[in-house]
């Protein structure tokens, strides 16, 4: 069986619940506060591992108590092993405000994430094999991301980039990835507002683009055709981490041999389930829940070629 390598960040998430998101210059009192493991890299690795795929998380952390907190949080996850990359910076932190309607805003530090060098990224990808999946996000530097993708390509691995956060000029790197996952806002930025995102991304060298649409599901553009995947109707109470559930679940299912459209359909259902719960990693579907979702993937709305 192939495996998933998630090369990305890990953070301690400090989550404050508020009645509504604050206005500029406004101070609000939180309704409650919690801490849990997070960071897009860690989140996506956890989601991938729960599909049953053998998963490795390679993530930079400091030597402070927060790094021990992260290690303890995922120590007993089946199918997930971790290569912690120790750096001199303090372990990265995400501060998350979640409104009563489920919407959120996030500010993350990235000193650890930015410390990963191209040489380290290349070494971490050096054991990838044909059929394996490399999953990355925007937290690492451009140089480290490009180095990792180049090594993964040389070794015949599938390369997936989740473009959040867009912290550097990504267009030159996009063509190194076989699958690019972006939400609607990120897709507009990457294609400079193009009306046909799929065609614009193909022009940048991306074979498969997946635009996540929140409660409306996802849109896949591949081989010149669009496939719309509808999301189940749910009541969202916290959308934090839903995009990571989608990306990690997709990567894990692809490593397990699932076809792209089937894997994306299950990933949409998994993300939809996560928004019905609070916090980041505590909201993620369990292995048993993912197995159930895998057995009843939603039908796909396939068929039209995107406008030229």
Image (cartoon, grey):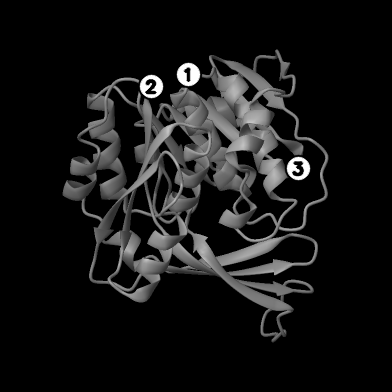
| Dot 3 or dot 1, earlier in sequence | 3
Give residue 215's mark. 3
- Gap between marks 2 and 3, in whole Å? 32 Å
Task: Characterize the local packing of mark 2: few (<14), some (14-19) or many (20 or more) Cα atoms within 10 angstroms.
Answer: few
Residue marked by disc 2? 1
Q: Nearer the viewer, residue 16 or 137?
A: 16
**SS for callout 1:** loop
Task: Characterize the local packing of mark 1: few (<14), some (14-19) or many (20 or more) Cα atoms within 10 angstroms.
Answer: few
Does 296 appear above or below 245? above
Q: Nearer the viewer, mark 2 or mark 3?
A: 2
Q: Position of residue 16 (x, y in %)?
A: 65, 74
Q: Judge from the rendering whether residue 25 lies leftward or rightward of residue 198; answer left or right.
A: right
| Dot 2 or dot 3, earlier in sequence | 2
The answer to whether the residue labelled 2 contacts the one labelled 1, judged by CB atoms less than 8 Å apart, is yes
**SS for callout 2:** loop
- Residue sitting at 70 percent across and 25 percent down? 228
- Gap between marks 2 and 1, in whole Å? 8 Å
Residue marked by disc 1? 257
Residue 125 falls in which quadrant of the image? top left
Q: Position of residue 21 (x, y in %)?
A: 73, 72
Q: Quadrant of the N terminus?
A: top left
Residue 66 falls in which quadrant of the image? bottom left
Res 23 seen here:
no
- Gap between marks 3 and 1, in whole Å? 27 Å
């Amino acid at each position: 069986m192939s495996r998933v390598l998630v090369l990305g960040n890990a953070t301690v998430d400090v989550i404050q619940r508020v009645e509504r998101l604050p206005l500029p210059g406004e101070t609000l009192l939180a309704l409650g506060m919690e801490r849990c493991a997070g960071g897009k890299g860690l989140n996506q690795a956890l989601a991938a591992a729960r599909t049953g795929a053998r998963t490795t998380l390679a993530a930079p952390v400091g030597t402070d108590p927060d790094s021990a907190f992260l290690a303890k949080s995922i120590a007993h996850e089946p199918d997930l092993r971790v290569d912690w990359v120790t750096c001199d910076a303090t372990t990265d932190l995400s501060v998350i405000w979640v409104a009563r309607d489920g919407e959120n805003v996030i500010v993350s530090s990235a000193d650890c994430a930015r410390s990963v060098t191209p040489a380290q990224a290349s070494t971490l990808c050096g054991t990838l094999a044909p059929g394996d999946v490399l999953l990355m996000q925007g937290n690492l530097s451009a140089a480290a991301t490009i180095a990792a993708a180049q090594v993964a390509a040389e070794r015949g691995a599938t390369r997936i980039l989740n473009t959040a956060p867009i912290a550097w000029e990504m267009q030159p790197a996009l063509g190194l990835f076989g699958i690019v996952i972006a939400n609607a806002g990120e897709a507009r930025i990457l294609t400079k507002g193009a009306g046909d995102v799929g065609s614009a991304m193909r022009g940048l060298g991306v074979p498969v683009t997946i635009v996540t649409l929140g409660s409306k599901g996802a849109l896949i553009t591949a081989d010149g055709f669009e496939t719309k995947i509808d999301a189940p109707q749910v009541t969202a109470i916290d959308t934090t981490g839903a995009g990571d559930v989608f990306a990690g679940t997709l990567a894990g299912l692809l490593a397990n041999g699932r076809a792209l459209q089937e894997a994306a359909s299950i990933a949409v259902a998994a993300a939809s389930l996560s928004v019905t719960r609070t916090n980041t990693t505590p909201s993620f579907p369990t292995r048993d829940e993912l197995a159930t979702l895998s057995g009843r993937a939603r039908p796909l709305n396939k068929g039209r070629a995107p406008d030229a």
